[in-house]
Amino acid sequence: MNDSHGSATQGSRLGLARRGFRGQITTIQPLADERALAAAEIERRLLELGFVEGAAVEILHEGPVGGDPIAVRLNETTIALRRREAMALFVIQLDAAS
Amino acid sequence: MSAAVETSIWQFALVGTPNSGKTALFNSLTGSRQKVANYPGVTVERKSGVIRTPAGHTVNLLDLPGTYSLRGRSPDEEITRDAVLGRLASETPPDLLLCVGDATNLRVALRLVIELKRVGRPILLVLNMIDIARRRGIDVDLGKLEAELGVPVVTSVAVKRGGTEELLRRMDELATRAGLSGGENTWAPPSNADLRTAQREADRILRAAVSEPKRPDTLTARVDGVLLHPVAGLLILLAMLFVMFQAVFAWAKPVMDLISASFDALGVLAHDALPEGLLQSFVQNGVISGVGSVIVFLPQILIVFLFILLLEDLGYMARAAFLMDRIMGGAGLHGRAFIPLLSSFACAIPGIMATRVIDSRRDRLTTILVAPLMTCSARIPVYTLIISAFIPDRQVFGFVGLQGLVMFGLYAAGILSALAVSFVANYFFWREGATPPFMLELPDYKTPRVRSVAIGLYTRAMMFLKRAGTTIFSMMVLIWFLASFPRPPEGVTAPAIDFSLAAIIGKWLEPLLAPVGFNWQINVALIPGMAAREVAVASLGTVYAIEGGKEAAAQIGQTLAGQWSLATALALLAWYVFAPQCASTLAVIKRETGSWRWMWITFAYMLALAYVAALITYQTAVALGAE
C-alpha cells in the first residue's frame, strides 16, 4: 500500500493546474514549508477528506483573487482547498475538459 | 461493555462526518426534547435528547461533534473520540454507536465505520438522505453492504415525516434480540498508512454494494457556476450581505424600540409602586434596566442567526468562505470568519457567538479578538451626537457631506484596525504554530427545513439569554452600584451621580485622561457607558444636568459644543472606535472562549488602542489649533 511513498513523483502538482483540469492522483507529498503544518499532518487531512492515490479529481472553480482557493471535484464530493495545500497532490492529466 | 437490560435506559451516541445530515437526524429524532449544555471544562457544546422507541424503550441520544476520524484534532473531535471510547468521566459509555452517512456520498463515512469497528462497540450505520440518493439513481444493496462491512445498515430520511421509522424499529430489534454487547477495543490513532488502507477498503466495499449515480446532481454544479463565479459570485455575496445588514438594522429596530419602551414603562411602574429610596432605584435602574439591556439584543441576535442558519442549511456558508478566504487571508483571517465579522456590525455579541462555525481554535480566537472593532450599532448614537455637535454640516469636494464622510471614516477605521490587529495577533500569539489549512467540503445545495431552522434558532436564543444573561446582569448591577453610591447628602441640587463612586473614579482618572483631552465629566459618563455604549449619551446628559435623557440628544449636543473643544470631541470619537466600552461583549467573550484570559487580552489591547488613538488625535488637533 505504501508503494506511492517513493521519492519518485509522477505528474504535476494539482496546485498549479487551472480550472477545468481533470486528472488522477498519483502521489500525495506535501511541500516542506516551515509556515505550513507538518507535512504528515497535511497529508493526513487530505486523506481524511478522501484524497487517495488513484482517485480522479477535477478543478471545478477558482477563487476570485489569484484563482485561489480551488474547488476540486472528488468522486461525489466537492472540496475547497488552498493551492498551497493542493501542491501536495501530484496528478496526471486524464483528458482536457471542454 | 454494558449490556442493556430491558428496564434500563439505553445510551446511544450519534457519530458522523461533517455534512452527513447528522444534526438534521438528531433534530428529527429528538425534536424539542433536547438539552444543550457544555462538556465540563471545555467550550464544546453537548447536545443530548430523549427518544422513545416503538417498543417503549427510553433512549438517551448524545449528538457528538462531526468528525472524519477519531484522531481528536480539535477540542470538539477529542470529545467525540473520548465519548466513543467511553473515556469521558461525565458520560455513560454508549451502548450503541449510530454512525450517520450521507447516502449520496458514502466514501468517507464508510472509512469512519471501518475505524469505529475497532472500538469494539455495537454500530448501526444509518444511510441518511436515502431519498436524494434514490432520486439520483443510486442503488444501494443493503444486504451486501451489511455483509461486506460487518455492521447492520438502515436507511433514513431525516427531513421527512416518518423518515426515521425504520431506524427506530431497528434500534429496538438490535437491542432486544441480540443484546448490546461489543467486542474488544483495538483502536489506536490511525497512521497515514492506516487511513490509506481503510479508504481503499471503503472504496472497494462501495464499488461492490453501491452503484454509481445514473442521474448525478448537476444542479449544484450549475448553481455554483454562478455563485462561485469570480465576479458574479462576489456581487451576489455582497448583495446578500446588504440584505442581511439591512435586516439586522431595519427589521430589528421596531422590536428593539418596543422592548426598550416596555422596560422603560415597567421601570416607571416600579418607580411609582415603590417608596422613594434605594430599593426603588435598585429595582428601576439596576434590575429592570439591567434585564432590559440584555433582552434588547435578542431581535438582532435572532435575525443574524436566522440568516446564518438558513445559509448554513442551504450549503452557502462554505461557499462564502471559499469566496472570501483569500481576501481575508491577507490579514491572517480564515474565510469562515467573514460572516461573524459582518454580524459584528450589528452587534459584536451575535458575531462572537457566530464564530462557532470556525473549527480551528486559533482562527476562532483571532476572529473573537477583532470582532468588537467592527462598528456596532451601539456606537451610532454616540457618533451621531458628537458629529452633529462638532462637525460642520457642509459639502467637501462639492458633493460629499463632511458629516457623512467622518462617519464613513469611523467605520473604515474600525475595519482597518480589525485587519491590522488580526495581522499582529497572528504574528505574536501564533508565531510558533503553523497556519491552519483551509480545506472544506462544499456540500450539495439543499432546501433548508423550517423545523430544523426553528430548533436551531430556539437553542441559540436560550443560550444567549441563559449564559450572557447571568453575567451581563451582574455587570449591570455593579455599574448601577458605582453610579448610585454613596448617596448625595440631603438637600443638594446637583445630580446624584456627582457624589457617587463613579464620580470619584472619574475625578481620580482625570490626570490619566487629561492628555487625551477628557474632562472628569466625560470620565464619569464612560463608567455607565461600560454597560452599553449608547448609555454614555444619557450619562453625559445626567452629568451636565440636562433633563430628558436620550430624548434630549439635540440639547446635549448644544451644551457639549459650548463646553468641549473640537480636539476633545475628536479624541472621544477616536476613543469610541477602539474602547472596550461594552460589558456585554466582554461577558460573551469570557463565555465563548471559556477563559478570563481572552477577555482580559481583548479588554487590555482595546483600551491601549483607544488611549493611543485618542492621544494622537487630541495632541494633533491641539497642535493644529483646534483647542
Image (spheres, coloured by chain):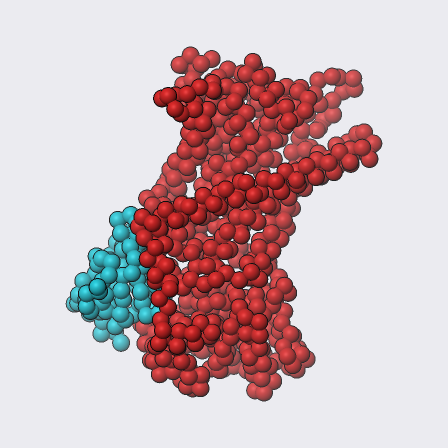
Chain colours: A cyan, B red
Task: Reply above or below: B314 against A27.
Answer: above
Query: Would you place residue B283 above or below residue B154 in this image?
Result: above
In the rendered view, tell whether residue B208 sits above or below residue B291. below
Q: Residue at x 40, y 52 (%)?
A: B320
In this rendering, position of residue B100 left or right of residue A73: right
| Residue A87 in the image, given as x and y percentages of width and height | 24, 58
Could you say which is closer to the camera, residue B411 or residue B294? B411
Front residue of B288/B96: it is B288
Instruction: Locate the N terminus of chain B and report the quarter of the image it occupies.
Output: bottom right
Give the total of numbered labels. Answer: 0
Give the image quarter of residue A8: bottom left
Residue B510, given in percent of the width and then of the height, sits at 56, 20
Q: Which residue shows up at 61% across the image and 66% down it? A: B31
Q: Residue at x 67, y 79 (%)?
A: B56
- Is any part of residue B341 visible from this angle? no
Q: Position of residue B92 (x, y in %)?
A: 59, 70
Q: Is residue B424 above or below residue B499?
A: below
Name the foreground residue: B150 vs B136. B136
Q: Is residue B303 visible?
A: yes
